Image: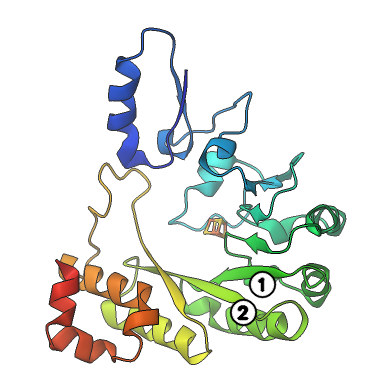
Amino acid sequence: MFLSVPFTWLMEEAKAEASKWKGKVRIGGPGVMKPTECEFEPILFHNPCAAFTTRGCPNKCSFCAVPKLEGEFREVDFRPAPVICDNNFLEASISHIKRVVDSVKKFSLVDFNQGLDAKRFTKQKADILGKLKCKVRFAFDSWNKESAVKDAIDLCRERTTKDIGVYCLIGYNDTPEEARERLELIRSWGIRPNPMRYQPLDAEVKNGFVAEGWDERELKKTMRYYSRLVWLGHIPFKDFQETGQGELFAI
Ligand code: SF4
């Protein structure tokens, strides 16, 4: 039996499941925090509409497990699918990017589900992706990315798609005020941010880590407010926090 574990905090549950099985059990996936080779595509069991066309990322951001799990960046054989999960698709060669785009043109919508690397989003790549009806996402994880992300969004709106999301890491090397400033800046660009709460690479429980300067309730409130802007966006965060609605949502 094979067990694919997506998060480190699910390892104990995976081991308990494995112990119930009489035969040999192989446990793999991001949760084991080491590269694992498989003779099948685990993502097929999580989401058959999703695929990877590259593995790895050369950026080595300190909060990210990808470089440790996936090793050197490489283009891989792929199964055309409408949800592309590559961690740094734009690091691929132009010929690979074109090959992927040609292979997924048949889908009515293609979702570049992981953040595209804003500084690698050139006019040429924007035009190639623009041949698709697609949704793209960028990541604004720290202030030194601000101009690259803003430039990529402008270019994307002009040449690729207006269907844009922005991931925003919070609770890592920031303060609540700084994190909210980034989240509000994304809103001022006309995009609803997608806040991502930082989880340590070896976390044994989900949402167990609270960075210095934050407390658990404030993290929860910030996550809940900015994840629900469709409903809560008409209320300023300050009012959400102060009127008790934040308390209600934070429970
Ligand atoms: S760019 Fe993205 S995938 Fe690459 S190391 Fe940074 S966070 Fe991870």
Residue 41 position within the rendered picture, expressed as x and y whole percent measured from the top left: 62, 33
User: In the image, 25: left or right of 14?
Assistant: right
> Label 1 belongs to which residue?
119
> Can the viewer see residue 84?
yes
Mark 2 and mark 1 in contact? Answer it, CB < 8 Å: yes
Considering only vertical position in the picture, is 163 above or below 30? below
Image point (30%, 45%), residue name: 203
User: In the image, 61: left or right of 241?
Assistant: right
Residue 210 position within the rendered picture, expressed as x and y whole percent measured from the top left: 22, 61
Q: Amino acid at mark 1?
A: Lys
Residue 225: assigned label = none
Q: For numbered disc 2, what is the local secondary structure? A: helix
Looking at the rendering, the quadrant in which ligand 1 lies is bottom right
Residue 132 position within the rendered picture, expressed as x and y whole percent measured from the top left: 78, 67
> Label 2 belongs to which residue?
148
Considering only vertical position in the picture, is 233 above or below 100? below
> Can the viewer see residue 215?
no
- Nearer to me, 13 or 174: 13
Question: Dot 2: few (<14), some (14–19), or many (≥20) neighbours within 10 Å?
Answer: some
- Dividing the image into 4 quarters, which one contains the C terminus? bottom left
User: In the image, 59: left or right of 108?
Assistant: left
Residue 222: image quadrant is bottom left
Residue 248 position within the rendered picture, expressed as x and y whole percent measured from the top left: 14, 74
Image point (17%, 65%), residue name: 216
- Nearer to me, 221 or 57: 221
